[in-house]
Image (cartoon, helix red, strand yellow):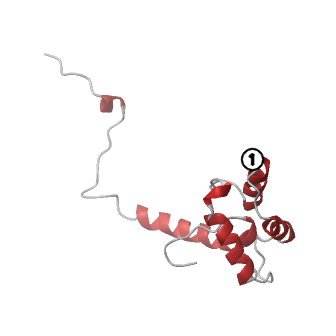
């Protein structure tokens, strides 16, 4: 009697070398990831000479981010969210737009900062 076919029958079988992954493979990959991470830090769009934004401005933008009356803010810039709220007639605050246009080259101002559990 023939055994029933399984979905895993269509994939090639691999032999494992003892328990876990093959030795040495994981270390090489970590080294490559570290090199990529260092490159990303160096290629950051924010210049080292650019001063951090004013704390009062960041607090104002944080309040705008946390305000649900202007709609969701995931996947778009703060200026796009402001413009969408304006088109929908939600009357977003004008000083937010002015600040976003003034500091348009600073990614800390342009993009919403995501809270990572450490603090603001």
Q: Is residue 72 above or below residue 48?
A: above
Task: Residue 59 in the image: state x and y as whole percent.
Answer: 68, 77
* Residue at x-position 76% and y-position 49%: 89
The quarter holding residue 92 reads bottom right
Residue 112 or residue 87, whichever sits in front: 87
**Residue 43 showing in the rendered view:** no
Q: Which residue is mark 1?
A: 88
Give the vertical position of 13 relative to 101 (above or below).
above
Q: Nearer the viewer, residue 68 or 19?
A: 68
Q: Position of residue 25 (x, y in %)?
A: 42, 61
Q: Which image quarter is the C terminus in?
A: bottom right
Q: Quadrant of the N terminus?
A: top left
Q: Relative to 1, is 63 above or below? A: below
**Is 54 situated left or right of 113 in this image?**
right
Disc 1: CA contacts within 10 A as few (<14), some (14-19) or many (>=20): few
Taking the spot 61% from the left edge, 67% from the top edge, the residue there is 36
Disc 1 element? loop
The answer to whether residue 35 is left or right of residue 102 is left
Residue 101: quarter of image: bottom right
Tell me if residue 47 comes above or below residue 88 in the rendering. Answer: below
Rendered location of residue 85, percent (x, y): 74, 53
> Which residue is nearer to you in this view: 30 or 117?
117
Residue at x-position 78% and y-position 67%: 96
With 67 as the anchor, is 33 left or right in this view? left
Answer left or right for 14 relative to 112.
left
């Amino acid at each position: 009697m023939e055994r029933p076919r399984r979905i895993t029958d269509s994939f090639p079988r691999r032999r494992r070398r003892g328990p876990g992954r093959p030795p040495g493979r994981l270390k090489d990959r970590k080294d490559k990831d570290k090199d990529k991470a260092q490159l990303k830090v160096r290629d950051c769009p924010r210049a080292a000479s650019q001063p951090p934004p004013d704390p009062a401005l960041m607090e104002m933008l944080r309040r705008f981010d946390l305000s649900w009356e202007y709609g969701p803010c995931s996947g778009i810039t703060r200026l796009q969210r402001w413009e969408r709220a304006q088109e929908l007639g939600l009357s977003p605050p004008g000083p937010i737009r002015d600040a976003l246009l003034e500091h348009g080259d600073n990614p800390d101002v342009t993009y919403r900062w995501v809270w990572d559990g450490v603090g603001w």
